[in-house]
Image: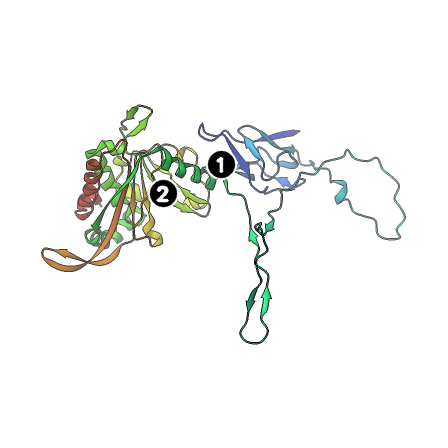
Amino acid sequence: MKLEVRTPTLSDSVASGTLLPWRKRVGERVARDETLVDIETDKVILEIPAPASGTLVEIVKPEGAAVQAGELIALIETGEGATAPVPAAQAEKPAPGAAPAVAAPAPEPVVPPPAAPARAVVAEARPHPAPLAPAGVGGDAVLHPPAAARREPMSRLRRRIAERLVAAQHTAALLTTFNEVNMQPVNELRQRFKAEFEVKHGVKLGYMSFFVRAVCQALEAFPIVNAAIDGTDIVWHADADIGIAISTPRGLVVPILRRAQTLNAAGIERAIADFARRARDNKLTLDELAGGTFSITNGGVFGSLLSTPILNPPQSAILGMHAIQERPVAEHGQVVIRPMMYLALTYDHRLIDGRDAVQFLVAVKSALEAPAALLGEI
């Protein structure tokens, strides 16, 4: 009995996907729920499992094919004895000098699945060839041809990131305001309670729980920063659904921390650690990446000292964290060394006035510099 393998149902915001390399070949046995192939959308990579145990007898859609939700991509023959016919090109050839075998009825021909196009390594076109570069010192120079450039198609995720960033620049009136925060109080709290926190909650006490809770407090005080423009309307969000930007080998993903204002420090740290782990393993779901009312991105983990983040439409603002760096600062009339971090808030000036943006960022700074309330119960 042949069973159809179809692509899964995608979300309303994802129309199609691209098939990645097949994990099984025609003729191989597969087990029920074993992953046959991955489908890459512009948000996540989804695994497509075998609906039953059997033999993969046909691959309808090859690697690289664009597929819609519910589209037929393969066939599986169930049953212990199920086998796939071998293409004629793969049939064993007789040894030289051997007598020809008696002809048997030819099996029904099978068309092998088309191979994915190879990624060519090509040199970029130039109107005139580049001169050969000399190498070596003294004597005759050794001439080397220019190195070839390598081309490969952008992934769906990278294309989607590019589209959204350009759209944000073209449709929103982006403006960034900056401030800096003294991270010493947070560092002291983390140092004091990190061992107890990890033993009790099974997760490390990082910086993100302080920032998320500080942002939630500031959003409550300045709800316009949590709002969005929809046509000629303003949408006032009741919950703080915070997008946490996570870098992966495929690009940036932003899973959503739902109703972040209801979470304690342990709940925030657990959720973000889980997001980061599953983002690296391509296990995030489409629902976890949809929505969001505000975002936080941390370029500091890569060493960024200062940047202007680009907001994630239709959100109206995004907070950028940066590297903590010891700097001399004036404190009570004295110059002291403190661990300082620059903060950047990029916002849509069509909706958010400069006064609200600046006061929002000051509220975040103030909460972080008096962080006992942010940590709450250990």
Specify few, some or many for label 2: CA neighbours under 10 Å numbering under 14, 14-19, or 20 or more: many
Q: Earlier in the sequence, mark 2 or mark 1?
A: 1
Q: In the picture provided, is 259 more to the left or to the right than 373?
A: right
Residue with the mark numbered 1: 41
Residue reaching furthest left? 333
Three-letter amino acid code at the position of disc 2: Ala
Relative to 27, residue 190 above or below:
below
Visible in this render: residue 176? Answer: yes
Q: Where residue 197 sits: x, y (%)?
A: 26, 49
Image: 218 above or below 143? above
Using a 10 Å C-alpha cutoff, classify the residue at mark 1 as few (fewer than 14 neighbours), some (14 to 19) or many (20 or more): many
The quarter of the rendered structure image containing the N terminus is top right
Could you tell me the amino acid type at mark 1?
Answer: Thr
Residue 148 in picture, x, y percent from top left: 57, 55
Rendered view: 92 above or below 174: below
Q: Residue furthest top?
A: 232
Discs 2, 1 touching: Cβ within 8 Å: no
Residue pictured at 78% horizontal, 47% vertical: 92
In the image, 291 versus 331, the foreground residue is 331
Residue tagged 2: 245
